[in-house]
Amino acid sequence: MSRLFILGSGGPKPGNDRHGESYVLQLGDERLLFDCGPATTHKLLAMGMHPTQIDNLFFTHHHMDHDIDYPCFLLTRWDSGAGKENRLSVWGPKLTEQLTERILDQEVGAYAHDWIARINHPLSLNAHVLRGGDLPRMPPTLDVTDIGPGHVTKGKDWEVTSAPAEHVQPYLDSLAYRIDSDEGSFVFTGDTHPCDTVRDLAKNADVMVMVTVDLQADIDGSPEGDYMSGTIGTGELAQEAGVKKIVLVHNTAWAIPGRMEKGIAEIASVYDGEIVFGSEMMEVPV
């Protein structure tokens, strides 16, 4: 059975109980994590999941509201896994490998001091053994791959492909992801404005998790309107792609009674599928 969890549904500016972006797609007994924004690790636990249950992590891009909890997730997963966890695979656009190195590498990693202490000091070694781990305790290891558009990876009954998402190039590369599975097709756009590559990726998808930053009239004619998606843009893209259900995220600015209803009505005026207003710590029926 597939399940979709919204851990973070906001953006870089916290507000209305929303901050950053991260999502879990559960397919059977496998859980895929998309982005790792503020407090992702805590939110996973609060929703009854553990970092050791995540074996694949996909980054859409490397703005801080999409990756700032990455060090916490990596070290929590390694430390509590006691060496029994599956090997983690991480995928993302350019900078994913560099970011990981700058977190964990023994010479340049900002958190190398943490794991070096934990694999050497008797206190940490004892905790490791009490959790079921074996000695000697090994450093954290994972598989990290910078990727571009195209086939990314596959699991038991699912396959992931990616496409360019137009956002803040040339400063950061951005990707949208599509997961095709026996339990349906799912798209995570990351931050983008409506563009052909994302529209093509989302063709006939069952569910699309789509950035929708504000009411269309409030961003038209501004840089936000040029590089992000508003209500009408989201609705038109989903309608043109034939998406069956859209989940609206990155929506802090209009998560206010009155504005929310107005925005949903705007989307419904150009889109005839199901609309879900994404909220923090929400399970979306799929």
Image: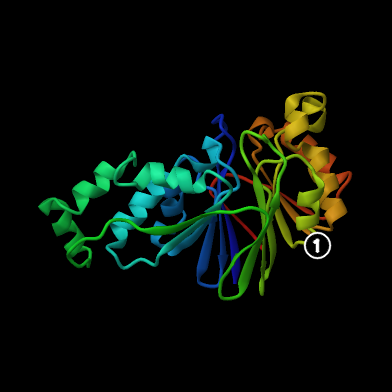
Q: Amino acid at mark 1?
A: Asn
Which residue appears farthest toward the front when viewing the image?
107
From the viewer's perspective, tell me whether residue 253 is left or right of residue 197: left
Residue lying furthest left: 122
Q: Nearer the viewer, residue 233 or 91?
A: 91
Q: Name which residue lies at 55% across and 72% down.
A: 28
Dividing the picture into quadrants, the one containing residue 283 is: bottom right
Image quarter hosting the C terminus: bottom right
Identify which residue, 226 or 148, lies in the foreground: 148
Check the image and tell me how it is coloured.
Answer: rainbow
Q: Is residue 73 shown above or below 263?
A: below
Q: Indicate the secondary structure of the residue bearing disc 1.
A: loop
Residue under pointer 1? 204
Residue at the top extreme of this rendering:
222
Residue 24 position within the rendered picture, expressed as x and y whole percent measured from the top left: 55, 57
User: From this viewpoint, is residue 208 visible?
Assistant: yes
**Tag count:** 1
x and y percentages locating residue 121 in the rendered image: 13, 50
Question: In the drawing, does residue 68 fall left or right of residue 156?
Answer: left
Q: Position of residue 265 (x, y in %)?
A: 82, 41
Mark 1, Cα crowd under 10 Å, few <14 / some 14-19 / many 20+, is some
Residue 272 in view here: no
Where residue 26 appears, x then y in whole percent? 55, 64
Q: Quadrant of the N terminus?
A: bottom right
Q: Which quarter of the figure has residue 20?
A: top right
In this rendering, would 32 be left or right of 86? right
The residue nearer to you, when weighing 246 against 57, is: 57
